[in-house]
Amino acid sequence: MSSLLTPFLWSFLPGQITHQLLPYLSTSLPGIFPPASRGSPTYLRNYRIAFTGVICTYLAYTFYTGEASQNIREDYYALLGVNPDVDEDGLKRAYRTLSRLYHPDRAGSGNDDVFILIRRAYETLSDPVKRYAYER
């Protein structure tokens, strides 16, 4: 759904935001955005500058939030509480201990996401091919 909505928002919202923002910019910063009537060359110049600012601000926000979310990488070893050189038995023991604590049937429905993350970590680290790919 987000992939369908994004192009529409990129084509529609920046122009609307710029039109709403431009009168405030003209009154608060008349040296940079001199007041002008709509359609005049000065208004078009002001619009282009404000539009560029709106786009750059949104791009900076998008890059910042995207970078922040990519920096939060799941550390499966820390999640399971094991060392990276753990053997299969130690991995299974850690998984069983945590699954007893966080299984939705025992801990309630509030820990569903934690249990799914623990299960995904165990499945990734218990398969040698997936573990090799994860460590790279």
Image (spheres, rainbow, N blue to C red):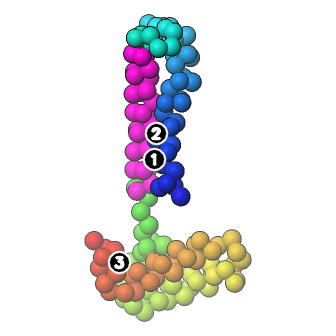
Cα distance between the residues tagged 1 and 3: 43 Å
> Crowding at label 2, few (<14), some or many (≥20) Cα neighbours within 10 Å?
few
The amino acid marked with disc number 2 is Ser
Give the CA separation, mark 3 to mark 2: 47 Å
Helix, strand or loop for disc 2: helix
Q: Is residue 67 magenta?
A: yes
| Among the two numbered marks 1 and 3 on one chain, the one whose residue lies closer to the N terminus | 1
Give residue 7's mark: 1
**Picture coordinates of residue 135 (x, y %)?**
31, 73
The residue that label 3 is drawn on is 84
Mark 3: few/some/many CA within 10 Å (<14, 14-19, 20+):
few
Q: In the shown orientation, is residue 105 left or right of residue 78?
A: right
Q: Is residue 84 left or right of residue 109?
A: left
Q: Which residue is mark 2?
A: 11
Span highlighted in magenta in the image: 44-70
Residue 64, percent from left and from top: 42, 44
Whether residue 84 appears in magenta in the rendering, the answer is: no
Labels 2 & 1 near each other (Cβ < 8 A): yes
Q: Is residue 52 above or below residue 79?
A: above
Q: Amino acid under label 3?
A: Pro
Looking at marks 3 and 2 on the same chain, the residue that comes earlier in the sequence is marked by 2
Furthest residue in direction front, as rendered: 39
Q: Name the residue: 52% across, 74% down.
A: 117
Three-letter amino acid code at disc 1? Pro
Relative to 50, residue 40 above or below:
above
Q: Secondary structure at mark 3?
A: loop
Q: Nearer the viewer, residue 8 or 21?
A: 8
Instruction: Assess disc 1: are there few (<14), some (14-19) or many (≥20) residues with their C-alpha within 10 Å of its C-alpha.
Output: few
**Residue at coordinates 41% horizontally, 80% vertically from top-left?**
124
